Image: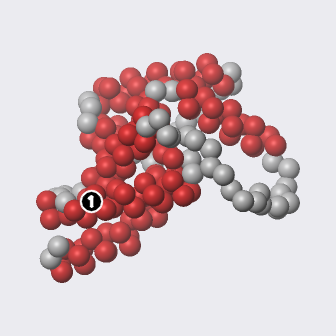
Amino acid sequence: MHPDQQREFAEFVASRSDSLIRLAYVLTNDQHAAEDLMQTALMKTAGHWRKIRGNPEAYVRRVMYHEQVGRWRSPRWGRERVVQALPEQAVADRTGEVETRLTLQQALRTLPVRKRAVLVLRYYEDLSESEVAKIMGCSVGTVRSQTHQAVVRLRELVGEPITLEA
């Protein structure tokens, strides 16, 4: 990579890594997996940096999305990890919040991968329908219909009103 390209890439990583790690965390639901996902996406992006024109963040997001979909399809995804000792920390009682979050996470896991990704990109990343369509390689109409179907299904699974704001 040319020194100017190395500098541009380093500046991009420095300026956008906070946003990218948040997206990776939402896609993986695990801090370490999110860091791995972001690192993998940035390595793949660095290899193509001279070819990337326009919006490099969109390219990285697309790489992250496709990489995570591949991980979800992998038979090794979701295996338990052994740790030597459990952390001993006192925390405030947040049972209600935890139950709500767990219910929603469980409901999200039942959604197909593309519908889950549409919800993450639309409501967590606050991207427009056209931006989501570009990242996912589909039409705006597909994004709209998958968003609608996913929200309807979440409401059925949770049994409570779900309010998502774009």
> Residue drawn 85% across and 50% down?
93
- Between 128 and 18, which is closer to the camera in this rendering? 18
> Please, is residue 44 above or below residue 15 in the view?
above
**Which amino acid, mark 1?**
Thr
Q: Can residue 122 be seen from the camera position used here?
A: no
Is the image coloured rainbow, by chain, by secondary structure, or in one colour?
secondary structure
**Where does residue 157 sit, x and y in percent of width and height?**
63, 22
Residue occupying the far top of the picture: 156
Front-most of residues 143 and 92: 92
Q: Position of residue 1 (x, y in %)?
A: 17, 73
- Residue 9 seen in the current view: yes
x, y percent for residue 8: 24, 74
Among the 4 quarters of the image, the one containing residue 45: bottom left
Classify 98 as above or below 56. Answer: above
Residue at position x 35%, y 30% in the image: 143
| Residue where numbered disc 1 is placed | 45
For image coordinates 14% across by 59% down, the residue present is 51
Q: Is residue 117 left or right of residue 30?
A: left
